[in-house]
Image (cartoon, rainbow, N blue to C red):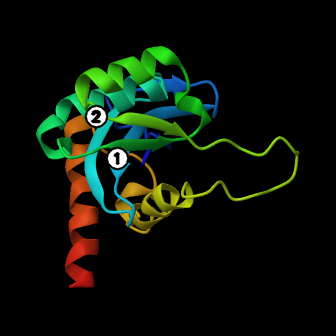
């Protein structure tokens, strides 16, 4: 499962972008998780990078760790044949889009809650609810540490 989260920056951050869809000036975290919500790839970009481009960058940067992936579950923001073709080139996996129902009622999209729960886990870390880091790599390492702490507490 793949998703992205826009996070506001503080005044100290060097890399800034504006996500017009969410009206957030800051960074974007792109994560690839398994069916239990554990991360297999994390990439941090500025918020102006769209979800599809960020997901493909996460796939490319973490290709050795994703070699056994057969299918990628995404939401409606990742639709389109160019994304599916690029995903097939990088991972050789199929893309499954979890669609919302056509009715305008609230409904949980099947299996999509797993990746949202992973974002909620790292939001529990006080330092990650807002981006206070000057560099993108530092933000990436703190996200990795947050998941590491989560895994250590589970064992």
**Left or right of 134, for residue 64:** left
The residue under the point 54% across, 58% down is 111
Task: Name the spot of residue 145 as percent of width and height, x first.
Answer: 21, 61
Ranked by sequence position, the earlier of labels 2 and 1 is 1
Give the quadrant of residue 53: top left
The residue under the point 37% across, 43% down is 71
Foreground of the two, 148 or 58 = 58
Residue 49 seen in the current view: no
**Left or right of 107, for residue 89:** left
Question: Residue beneath label 1, please?
Answer: 32
Residue 85: assigned label: none
Task: Name the spot of residue 149 as percent of width and height, x first.
Answer: 23, 72
For disc 1, the neighbor class at 10 Å (few under 14, some 14 to 19, many from 20) is many
Q: Is residue 126 above or below residue 22?
A: below
Q: Residue furthest left?
A: 64
Give the quadrant of residue 151: bottom left
**Callout count:** 2
The residue under the point 48% across, 61% down is 114
Placement of the C terminus among the 4 image quadrants: bottom left
Residues at badges 2 and 1 in contact (C-beta under 8 Å)? yes
For disc 2, the neighbor class at 10 Å (few under 14, some 14 to 19, many from 20) is many
Give the quadrant of residue 128: bottom left
Foreground of the two, 32 or 128 = 32
Residue 113 seen in the current view: yes
Task: Name the spot of residue 86 as percent of width and height, x first.
Answer: 34, 19
Q: Please, what secondary structure does the residue beneath circle 2 have?
A: helix
Task: Name the spot of residue 104 as percent of width and height, x first.
Answer: 88, 45
Q: CA distance from mark 2 to mark 1?
A: 8 Å
Foreground of the two, 43 or 96 = 96
Foreground of the two, 51 or 6 = 51
The residue under the point 24% across, 45% down is 140
Residue 58: assigned label: 2
């Amino acid at each position: 499962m793949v998703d992205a989260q826009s996070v506001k920056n503080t005044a100290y951050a060097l890399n800034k972008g504006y996500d017009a869809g969410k009206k957030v000036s800051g960074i974007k975290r792109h994560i690839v998780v398994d069916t239990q919500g554990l991360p297999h790839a994390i990439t941090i970009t500025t918020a102006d990078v769209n979800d599809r481009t960020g997901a493909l960058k996460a796939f490319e940067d973490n290709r050795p760790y994703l070699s056994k992936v057969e299918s990628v579950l995404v939401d409606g923001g990742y639709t389109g044949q160019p994304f599916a073709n690029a995903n097939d080139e990088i991972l050789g996996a199929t893309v499954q889009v979890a669609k919302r129902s056509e009715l305008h009622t609230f409904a949980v999209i099947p299996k999509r809650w797993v990746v949202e729960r992973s974002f909620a886990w790292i939001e529990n870390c006080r330092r990650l609810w807002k981006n206070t880091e000057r560099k993108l790599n530092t933000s990436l390492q703190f996200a990795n540490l947050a998941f590491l702490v989560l895994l250590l507490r589970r064992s």
